[in-house]
């Protein structure tokens, strides 16, 4: 099942980050998106000029790097994450 990168998908990803203790911010600037710890707070900063697809891709890349075990995720997000991860890998493999 391929999940489209839509605003509801983006919203669900943002909820996962909040559940993991991260805040997601969209800021303007000419920088590469990523995540960082600011003053002992977990903050993900994304270029606000990215479209929905770009935001979802960046958030998935970051999420893959911070989730070591699916059990870290709330049960209601696990299935969504697994499906999105499969979709993300398929798209990544098609590009390479």
Image (cartoon, rainbow, N blue to C red):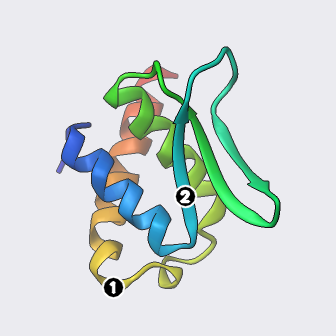
Tag count in the figure?
2
Looking at the image, which residue is at 38% across and 33% down? Answer: 91
Work out whether mark 1 precedes mark 2 in sequence or the reverse, and give the earlier one: 2
- The image shows residue 58 at horizontal and vertical percentages of 52, 37
Q: Nearer the viewer, residue 72 or 24?
A: 24
Few, some or many C-alpha atoms within 10 Å of disc 2 (few <14, some 14-19, many ≥20)?
A: some
Q: Is residue 64 left or right of residue 50?
A: right
Name the side, left or right, on which 26 lies relative to 41: left
Residue farthest along the top direction in this orientation: 30
Question: Which residue sits at x=55%, y=58%?
Answer: 23
Residue 83's quadrant in the figure? bottom left
Of the pair 68 and 23, the residue shown nearer to us = 23
Look at the picture and state if 77 lies above or below 94. below
| Residue 54 in picture, x, y percent from top left | 42, 27
Q: Residue at x 33, y 53 (%)?
A: 84
Q: Label 1, on which residue?
A: 75
Please give the residue where the numbered disc 2 appears in the rendered image. Answer: 23
**Distance from the alpha carbon under mark 1 to that under mark 2:** 20 Å
Task: Identify whether 61 is placed above or below 72.
Answer: above
- Reply above or below: 50 against 6: above
- Near mark 1 (Cα within 10 A), the count class, few <14, some 14-19 or many ≥20, is few
Q: Secondary structure at mark 1?
A: helix
Q: Residue 14 at x, y = what percent?
A: 40, 55
Quadrant hosting residue 81:
bottom left
SS assignment at label 2: strand
């Amino acid at each position: 099942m391929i999940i489209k990168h839509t605003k509801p998908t983006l919203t669900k990803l943002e909820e996962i980050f909040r559940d993991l203790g991260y805040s997601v911010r969209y800021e303007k600037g000419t920088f590469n998106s990523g995540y960082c710890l600011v003053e002992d707070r977990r903050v993900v900063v994304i270029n606000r000029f990215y479209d929905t697809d770009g935001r979802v891709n960046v958030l998935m890349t970051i999420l893959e790097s911070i989730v070591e075990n699916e059990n870290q995720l709330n049960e209601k997000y696990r299935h969504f994450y697994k499906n999105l991860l499969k979709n993300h890998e398929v798209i990544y493999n098609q590009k390479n």
